Image (cartoon, rainbow, N blue to C red):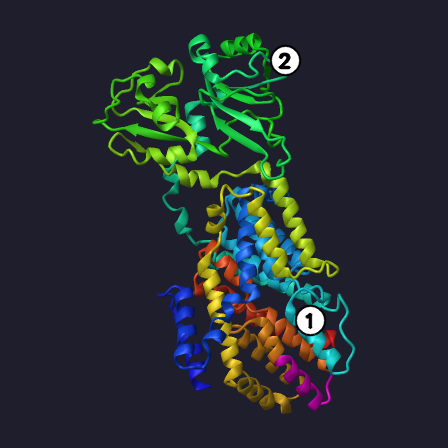
Amino acid sequence: MWVTLAILLLSAIGFMHGRLRSDIVALCALVALLVFQILTPAEALSGFSNSVVIMMVGLFVVGGAIFQTGLAKMISSRILKLAGQSENRLFLLVMLVTAGIGGFVSNTGTVALMLPIVVSLAASAKMNASRLLMPLAFASSMGLFTLIATPPNLVIHEQLVSGGFEGLSFFSFFPVGLICVVVGTIVLMPLSKWFLSGKDNEKDKGKHNNKSLKELVAEYGISTNLFRLKVVPTSLLKGKTIIQLDVRRNYGLNILEVRRSDVSHHRFLKTVTQQLADPNTRMQIDDILYITGDAEKVNQFAIDFQLEMLDGRVTEEAGKTDKSLDFYDIGIAEIVLMPSSKLIHQNIKETGFRDKYNVNVLGIRRKNEYILKDLGSEKVHSGDVLLVQGTWTNIARLSQEDTEWVVLGQPLAEAAKVTLDYKAPVAAIIMILMVCMMVFDFIPVAPVTAVMIAGLLMVLTGCFRNVEAAYKTINWESVVLIAAMMPMSQALEKTGASEYISNTLVSGLGSYGPLALMAGIYFTTSLMTMFISNTATAVLLAPIAMSSAIQIDANPTPFLFAVAVAASMCFASPFSTPPNALVMPAGQYTFMDYVKVGLPLQIIMGIVMVLVLPLLFPF
């Protein structure tokens, strides 16, 4: 027992010190429990197969898809309209919306749902996301409005029923949850401003030196020179290849790409296909041609081949009303020619960008001059910056030719930021289905199964650019942290440490009356939940609270409520609840950030609950 407590203490010191990563500290604790034979290998590794951990992995994927498809940005823009320019109003909205959802959906699911939305919301409002993410996690636990809000609620309900008392109704927790949300919001508003607003996001440092894709388009004036033409059934273009048209020589135009909507039976799996304007690309009905060049020549080309001009009308893939380039499959990047490059003094046609690398040259930046027309015959000079267009894979290949040119910025990193907005409706449907499966009992699907189904559907329906992009959304540090710490609760129970601590504290306070005893139960639960899961703590302390109340001839209901609330209101540690761990990497939090913000909140919430619970449920 004492060895287990020593390992627990050293782990807590390691987390607070912050020198080692949290997941490494947790793994060290796990190995120590194995070395001292406190746990068997099967018991020690049980956390990695726990449904909560698997659910976390799936929720990372679902959350990543919500962000990747732009659904998070759409939802956040609506919330932002309600908040206006006020940071405090935005903070209140995040707290209230999260707590409201948390009353009906698991707190882990709530955070996974809201996390990408809040990150996008903070970016749109030019607000530090760190100020919102920790309150988001805490608010998901505060929404104790219903019996199904958290597992500890169900634990004390079962304890009352098994003890021969009347069970709790669906909304028995509503007044408690309401008080928790009010107190939590009042306390968190100043604490988050003092301790979280000034945090710098290290990952974002230095990124502003790279031009975004939109900035490149604006700088070269591509959009002002861009036209969209549609191949209609009467078009003379139908069935012809791009090389047969020879629009560059005949009209001085440049076909950048062909946008083809997929109307096959696989429409749900893939909605829009982008193709680079390959010479052998054969035109089909409903193809959209993206063309740059002189407006009069574009108009003449459209008349000659009976093409429909789409400028000013809604685009084909996402209901947009602009004619800007999209970068789903095709991207752009800048390359600067080296002084030793063999391409110097060659014209664009002779450089072979199209033949060797399958990329187009859209423009040339020469000092302060931008050359966009008649590029085929334009000779390149040393130091010229070329704006090239191609598939993201082909752009990545350009980086390998470092003796000829240098690719500016990080085009693949920019590609990862591109939202597949035409997939937003698909992601929304999958997200709603997941929530329904988790909320409604008549659907015979476990929450972890619902999350796994949703994550798999997000990948299969193309809400990610590829499977690798889905894997990259998973934060393995958080997964390993929770999985490695879960067996600690088993070690505390197995060695009798949990029972020893709880019995000692509770028996010592029984003689001071029901209020003192309930306070002891509450803060014992609160302390233990910092190191073991809230569900395990509730299961352990619920029968002790029940028997203690019966011994002093008091109503067990407020004592059991103290266990349930204290188990959920644990904020001083990142691994006490999955929501706390989920926001840790996104908010760039350290262990001490949780102590600074979460510990005062946890103490204040405990004092309020100890005073309020006897008023709601008399002894």
Quarter of the image for the C terminus: give it. bottom right
Residue type at the position of mark 2: Thr
The residue carrying pointer 1 sits among few (fewer than 14), some (14 to 19) or many (20 or more) residues within 10 Å by Cα, namely some
Q: Amino acid at mark 1?
A: Leu
Query: How many neighbours does mark 2 have within 10 angstroms: few (below 14), some (14-19), or many (20 or more)?
Result: few
- Which portion, as a residue range, is magenta? 541-555
Q: Earlier in the sequence, mark 2 or mark 1?
A: 1
Q: Position of residue 226 (x, y in %)?
A: 50, 20
**Which residue is depicted at the point 36% across and 65% down?**
20
Residue at far right of view: 166
Secondary structure beneath label 1:
helix
Disc 2 designates what residue? Answer: 234
Give the image quarter of residue 146.
bottom right
Q: Is residue 92 above or below residue 485?
A: above
Q: Assess whether residue 546 is covered by the magenta stretch.
A: yes
Of 189 and 394, nearer the camera is 394
Q: Which residue carries the number 1 mark?
A: 154
Tell me where residue 598 appears, x and y as whole percent: 52, 66
573 or 335, nearer to the observer: 335
Looking at the picture, how far across and down is residue 410, in whole percent? Answer: 37, 39
Name the residue: 39% across, 27% down: 358
Residue 545 drawn in magenta:
yes
